[in-house]
Amino acid sequence: MYAIVEIAGQQFKVEEGRKIFVHRLDAEIGADVEFDKVLLIEDDDKVTIGEPVIADFIVDGRVLAHIKGDKVIVFKKKRRKGYQKLNGHRQQFTQVEIVSIAPKGTPKKVAKIAEPTVAAIEVEEAEKELKVAPAKKTVKAKAAQAENEVAEKKSAATKKPAAKKPAKDKNE
């Protein structure tokens, strides 16, 4: 089952359990949102088209995160005039997980809140170790530097002093 829904002025094809990125919504992370502008529903090869919307259907979702999109560079230039202008832009997005597609008045499904998995916990522990690792590296670097200094002192001590030139007689 899927539906075509209008969210923040754009149309999206949504399915239950699917995660989509939409333009920034005014909702807190973890909040439930409802989209009532359902334009089309397909259920077991039975297609229902709204005129313009299907009045008795609603799509429920949950806000997962607010993020920024990739940076878009806008560069303007007029040749031989010395005019150049550089602008950048990062679009704000909201990640929404579709919980259910159902007629209005039906009991809402309870979405499972993602619990940290074993892999996520291992990643966090690895990150903690990486934060400690640079301090160990600096200690190793200091030890290597001290060894280099000792080696330089030894090589300086083993060098033979330059032979002195015989003194010239004043009478010559």
Image (cartoon, rainbow, N blue to C red):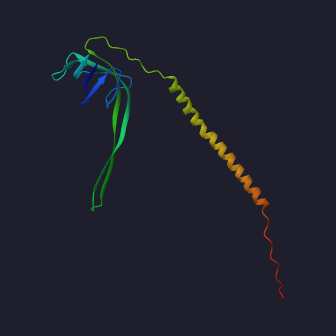
Tell me the residue at 62%/40% (across/down).
135
Provide residue 128's location: percent of width, then percent of height: 56, 32
Provide residue 113's location: percent of width, then percent of height: 42, 19
4 or 110: nearer the viewer: 4
Q: How many marks?
A: 0
Tell me the residue at 75%/58% (across/down).
155
Provide residue 167's location: percent of width, then percent of height: 82, 79
Q: Quadrant of the C terminus?
A: bottom right
Q: Is residue 102 above or below residue 12?
A: above
Tell me the residue at 80%/72% (across/down).
163
67 or 10: nearer the viewer: 10
Q: Residue furthest front?
A: 45
Q: Is residue 105 above or below residue 96?
A: above
Task: Give the quadrant of residue 17.
Answer: top left
Q: Quadrant of the N terminus?
A: top left
Query: Is residue 105 shown left or right of residue 114?
Result: left
Q: Residue furthest left?
A: 51
Task: Give the quadrant of residue 169.
Answer: bottom right
Provide residue 89's location: percent of width, then percent of height: 33, 43
Task: Give the quadrant of residue 126.
Answer: top right
Query: Is residue 171 shown left or right of residue 114?
Result: right
Q: Is residue 8 above or below residue 161?
A: above
Tell me the residue at 72%/49% (across/down).
147
Query: Is residue 41 shown left or right of residue 165?
Result: left
Q: Is residue 170 above or below residue 104?
A: below
